[in-house]
Image: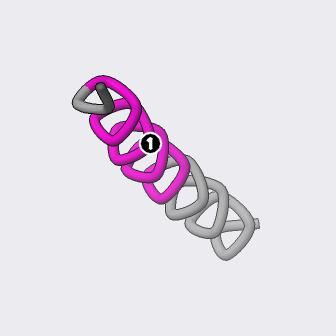
Amino acid sequence: MSVVITALIVFVIIFHVWAMVLEMFFWTKP
């Protein structure tokens, strides 16, 4: 169960980082 929780946390972190990158990319887009 600890492995599942760790994988879920890693997935959430990667998702948030990817969302921030996409937001910055579209925000600076003219």
User: Can you give x and y, in whole percent of width and height, for residue 8 in the image?
Assistant: 65, 56
Query: Dividing the image into 4 quarters, which one contains the C terminus?
Result: top left
- Confirm whether the magenta stretch covers residue 18: yes
Decide: few, some or many residues near mark 1? Use Cα within 10 Å; few <14, some 14-19, many ≥20.
few
Query: Which element type, helix, strand or loop, lies under badge 1?
Result: helix
Label 1, on which residue?
A: 22
User: Can you give x and y, in whole percent of width and height, for residue 25 in the image?
Assistant: 33, 41
Above or below, 13 against 27 in this view is below
**Residue appearing at x 34%, y 47% in the figure:** 21
Amino acid type indicated by mark 1? Leu
What are the residue bounds of the magenta stretch? 13-27
Q: Nearer the viewer, residue 16 or 7?
A: 16
Q: Nearer the viewer, residue 20 or 27?
A: 27
Q: Nearer the viewer, residue 10 or 29?
A: 29
User: Can you give x and y, in whole percent of width and height, for residue 2 in the image?
Assistant: 64, 68
The reply, left or right, for residue 9 in relation to residue 8 is left
**Residue appearing at x 44%, y 42% in the figure:** 22
Above or below, 25 against 29 in this view is below
- Confirm whether the magenta stretch covers residue 28: no
The reply, left or right, for residue 23 in relation to residue 27 is right
Above or below, 1 against 22 in this view is below
Residue reaching furthest front?
A: 30
Quadrant for residue 26, please give it.
top left
Residue reaching furthest bottom?
A: 3
Residue reaching furthest left?
A: 28
Q: How is the image coloured?
A: one colour
Query: Could you tell me what secondary structure mostly forms the magenta stretch?
Result: helix
**Residue appearing at x 35%, y 38% in the figure:** 20
Q: Nearer the viewer, residue 11 or 21?
A: 21
